Image: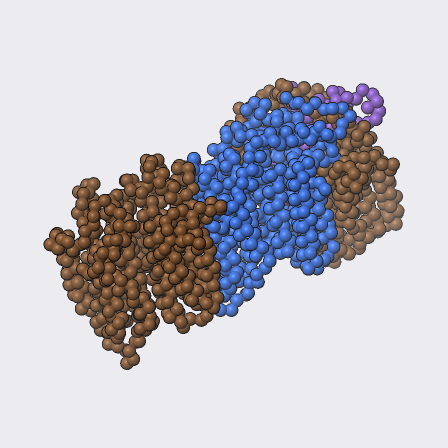
Amino acid sequence: MSLGLLLLLPAFFGIIHMKSWNPRERILLGFLLTSLLSFSLGFLWLHPELRILKVGNWPHFAGIVWILDGLSFLFCSVAILIYLPASIALREQNSSFQFFFHLFFAALLGAFLTADIFNLFVMFEIFLLSSYALFFGIKQLKEASNFIWINVFGSAVYLFAISYIYQNLSTVNMSDIAMRFEQLPMDRQDIIFLTLSFVFLLKAGLFPLFVWMPQSYPALPSSVLAFVGTLGTKLGLYAFIRWTSIVGGEVLARHADLFLSLAVMTIFLGALGAMGKRSLRNSLAYLGISHIGLLLLCASVGTTNALTALLVYFVHDVIVMAGLFFLCDDIESARNNRSIFNRQSLVSYIFLILILASAGIPPLSGFWGKLQILKFSTQLPMIFISVLVSAFLFVYIGLLIWSRYFVNIDDHSSDKAAGAKIGISFPSFYCLALSLAYAFLVSTQPTFFQFIAKELSDQNLYSVRLHEASINSKSTSQPELDND
Amino acid sequence: MSLDASNLQILCLILLFIHALNFTRLSSISFIAASALAFGVGIFFQNGLAPSHWALAEMSWSNLRQFFFLLVSGLGIIIGIYSHIYMGNYQREERSRFFGYLGLFQWTCLLLVISNHIYLFATAWELTSITSFLLIGFDRQSPKAQRGAIQAFLVTGLGGICLLGSLVLLSQQFQTYFVDELILRIATQPMQASVLATALLMLAALTKSAQFPFHFWLPDAMHAPTPVSAYLHSATLVKLGIFLVALFWPGFQHNILWHVGLSGLGLITFAWGAGFSILQTDMKASLAHTTYSQLGLMMMLFSLTSDKARAAGFVVLLAHALYKSSLFLSVGVISKATKSLDLRKCSGILRHSKVFLLLFAMAILSLIASPGSLGFVGKEWVMSILSGPFASSSAKYFSWACFVTGAYSTVLFGVLFFLRLYQKHTPSTTNETPKLSTSLALSFGILPLLGILFGCFLEPIFQWLDRLSPTAEKIESPFAHLLSGNFVLSILILLAGSWSAYKLSTDKKYLSAGWESKLNRFSLSNIFQNFSLERLPTHLEAIIYWFEAKTSKMAPQIVFLFFILLMMPLVASLQLPPVLGLPISSLGFVASVSAASLLALIIYFISHSMTQIFLLGAVGYLVAFSYASFGAPDLVLTQIIIETASLVLLVFAWLLSNERKKHRTEKLSKLSSIYSWLFSVGASIFLIGFLFLPPLEGVSQKLSSLYFFENSEALAFGTNIVNVIIVDFRGLDTLGEISVLALAALGAQALFRRRFRVHHIASHPFSSDWTRRLAKIFSLALLLFGVFYLSRGHHAPGGGFIGGGLGSLTLAMWMMSYGRPIYGSIWAIVGLVIAYASALLPQIFGLQFFESFSSPIGPSSLFFDIGVFAVVTGSVASLLEILYAIWTDQKGRRSQNA
Amino acid sequence: MPNFILMLALFLLLSIGLRMIFEPAFLKKIIGLGLFGHAINLSLLLSGWTKPQYPSIGRAAFLGNLSFENSSDPLPQALILTAIVIGFALTGFLILFHLMSERENS
């Protein structure tokens, strides 16, 4: 049992999926993979000695290290949680699709676990190529263009950043970077920090770097978007959080103003887009951008409280947005006959609860995250007011969607009685249940997130553990343990 | 189990359970039962705190809370009975849904009233808004109701967010999460409460209680079923803002903003609402206007410093609850009989039932605050407060002006309302008399009765007020000063109002006018609805489309521009002349790199694509040469092979692409060209410039490379260190990299299979015999070559990639010579499986993940390298396969067309 | 001086490569991708900070006096290898994607 299993299991399952199974069997395979992964993750988390994996048993500066700390654990578990409904929703897709999807998932888990900057780059590339393969049917060259070339530029800058890192710090291992970074002069720190942050924020979607996103969600089944769209940006978010925790608070504080203002702009532009766009899927896409803005706001502040808020809100965001996307296609197809609420209460209630959760209405899951964000931003009045305004805008967006799809607010149009029936599928129900369970859990036990945030802020933890682990790894001569 | 506050949580749970039964057949019965239970228990509960293990569930009980608790539950009983009869003709599911929502509302309202933790408080506040939203939108078929519901939720939701913000701020400032404690602390240090928190709290109260300028949602909320209007929007939900103000009064009673804001807006609302109510022809809408106007009066009273005002506020509140709900319920009775809510169609209806007439008259008496009703008591006290000391005379004039206007209009409205319903103005169109349901009337009969009783017998009121809101000075009965100025004034207002009402009731023009349609265009609620639900989204849609249109074309430019702007401040770090550690003295390296860049320059200026492609190949080979002069033989080999493969792909891409058919390829406009140059040059300056910075002293040692040199032979069993790094030390990177390659190939295959038939590949093998034989020999040689490189990779330049590149060429040759498909994707998958397995394999032998060991066959990395070999072979071969298929497809089509 | 030439050369490679990506014609973009890929690889090579020297390879060399001081840094070379292969995968995929979508749309 090792961390490497978390990467290889999805990859193996992807290969297994290349045989053409029927949808029922694919559901079984999905459950199987989810259970295997959850078991492994839990087992690894509970055994602290297994949480650091030095791949190949080489000392950490010579090989690649994977670490399962609190942040990775949280992101991995969320990814696994969302994998289950996604695999069920996507069971009709062909084998090649399944392979790409599973490799996408494997890349995601790998990226969350790796503690090596170049390994992270490789994971990013797997993630990118699998998303190209997933996204592009043959017809969509135009929309593909932006998506592809901007990401190519991003990868290029990433490689340059790696060369700067290796040049100045002589290592590509994250914990060594953490230890050596403070000794650099300020301008070098800025160069390295900004270059790599640019890449991660490009992936996450900070203003104005999200311009390639909404148009590149082409006519795909929305269940794909539920997984790929929601978790893709979170990869960039994770990388940014990890990176800022490695380089330390001072360098972030120097640039925090810039990131904060960009994040606020992201929130409002995203809300604007969600209000303006008529189709549900585009609306939700922009809502997602707005949420990322909120998360990046917390990440830019970087204090322990901010990170706690970020984590609480992050889990809610993924679950609820995935749930909304799962419902999205069905709702849009039933839209020809308006006012779904008239005909189908259950689906409407599910959607209502989910959209209210995303708006931050208590006692649903979004509220607790919002609350944490408000708590830490009381010291920053402009941020506090922006968060309140954005909270109101989210409620407004939710009600707009409700008015467009679920109820008939137009006096003059008649409400046709017959219409497509929306089946209540497992994925959306699952996400709803998860969201409610999360709301309950987080209202009683927010301490787990605080623990993770503290762990992150205390960056020496990353390196101290590694150095303890180094002592046992193999070499013919003892490497020097003290680098500075 | 004693009935003190510590059992509040249990009570809540029991109530929730009973209310859950509302959704079943028992609907109205369980609702009434729950209300009765709450009311009964509430009378006997003792004051105190109800702490809990789960801090969020902490509740508290005080006199104020008790009052509201009893109000909500007591009215609930009556509404329950009323609705049971009223909703009798609805279907069972509808009735269950109705009582379910209503029960949920009652439960959340009660929860709010007793909650002590601020998050629970905020939660319950929002939940009441949500349940109100569901109830207003109960009639799913009515667009007006849906719009009203959305509007109500928007406004009260805004209030909820303000409340949350305010509570968070206050809890941070005063370091407590409990409402009672918070209020105590604010009371001891009122100056510390920030202006923002105060303003937000006020906003919350104003929106919930429909005060100016947030009053407009209440009339449109009248599209809810009548019992809902009676319960929520006259007596309970809208009073929650007042509850908030009353609750926080100890903390904010000396706060200027609080005073001025709340009382000023309250008075304006009072006058405004009363005035507008006269202009309505819809019964419920007019009642709604008077509702928020009376709420304005209460708001003013509860925001003042004097405890006399507070006592007066409670009286007004109680009176209002009693008469307003009975008025609404009466309207319900009327509308059930006449099937209409329009005043003009219901004239004379009151004549048909004596009981009903009596009850209605009692309620109206209390509305207009005539002597003998509870409303009169309240009004007298208000006037005595207004006669008291004021901060400034303009404030006094303003308050009196608003008060008189409002009181006068209220009287006018009340009497007019009564007269319009009593007098017969329009001849009855049918002969049948509308039947006013007596049972319905009796169900709420106690309410107006209480209003009159309390007005006449004041002793219970005084005792109650003493407990609830003790005042410093003794309150006097309003009848004590029969000839005082205030009393005379109120009598004057009564008379004036009644006389005007009588006049208007005979004015035909007024009676038949439909004011609503004229007012609609200017009504705030219509404007708001129109704006928020139609206009604003449309405008925003235009904006966002514009934004998307502009940025989709310019997306790469925007990204580049952002990058350059981000790097701008760092320009100072760039160094000229550039330094790079130790001086690069190798002539070969510098020469080849410069030659490559010169070729790049030529590439730019040549426009013919084929030439550009070959020049790109030349650049690649020059770069390979530069690797050679740098001392990186593995890189040289890999670069050559990859460059060749790319060249093949590019050449065929050009040959097969449609762009070749166009005689002019698209070019960028002059302006775009300049911009593109700016961006590229800008980005490059930074990217390359940061590379050539002076070395730092003593920062870091290259532990990794030192380790590699010392240990690669002993522990990784290889002497080609680069290859050892790739397959042993950093094998996971390679694993990822071959996955990327496999993904590219399989992705292309997946796209391919959707469109093309596979047999195209096989249809055009080499035609001539000799070519085929040569190809077979050549491919065999290539394969041997590849395997040779694979096997020697660990100790000499070579390895999986190079071998694989050669192997792929082998497969390509085979494909072309035998004319059979080569299934490159299967090779790739097999290779992946081998590679993944070799990562897990060491664990079977008790070693770590991906650990290197030595076996009799060879080092473990050989196994992994074989996997890499297979993947590279398969992937590149399948890419070539697809290319070949497209080419033969095109050739085939050309020969068909010819 | 050699550093200056080197910097200029890399700068030319990178900027021309980036410039060509802005061209509307797809093939030119791929050519640009190739060019700046080379620039990236060379930059990675230079990040090793050592001058060009003996390759870090070979049993014979080991028996000789190959050591850390007098041979080139192998780690960046491994990274470049990975980058080359990934770049090639991307190029191959993009070219085929482009070809097939052209066919689909015509």
Residue B267 screen position, x and y as percent:
25, 50
Above or below, B392 against B595 in this view is below
- In this view, the residue farthest toward the front is B1
- In this view, the residue farthest toward the left is B483
Quarter residue A190 falls in: top right
Quarter holding the N terminus of chain B? bottom left
Q: Residue at x 60, y 29 (%)?
A: A460
- In this view, the residue farthest toward the bottom is B431
Q: Name the colour assigned to chain A in the rendering.
A: blue
C40 to the left or right of B6: right
Residue B276 screen position, x and y as percent:
26, 58
Q: Residue at x 63, y 29 (%)?
A: A464
Residue C96 screen position, x and y as percent:
69, 47
Q: Name the colour assigned to chain B in the rendering.
A: brown
Q: Name the colour assigned to chain C in the rendering.
A: purple
Q: Residue at x 37, y 69 (%)?
A: B86
For the residue pair B758 and B796, the one nearer the viewer reads as B796
Q: Which residue is drawn at 85% across and 45% down?
A: B775
Residue B512 screen position, x and y as percent:
24, 68
Quarter holding the C terminus of chain B? bottom right
For the residue pair B529 and B125, the one nearer the viewer reads as B125
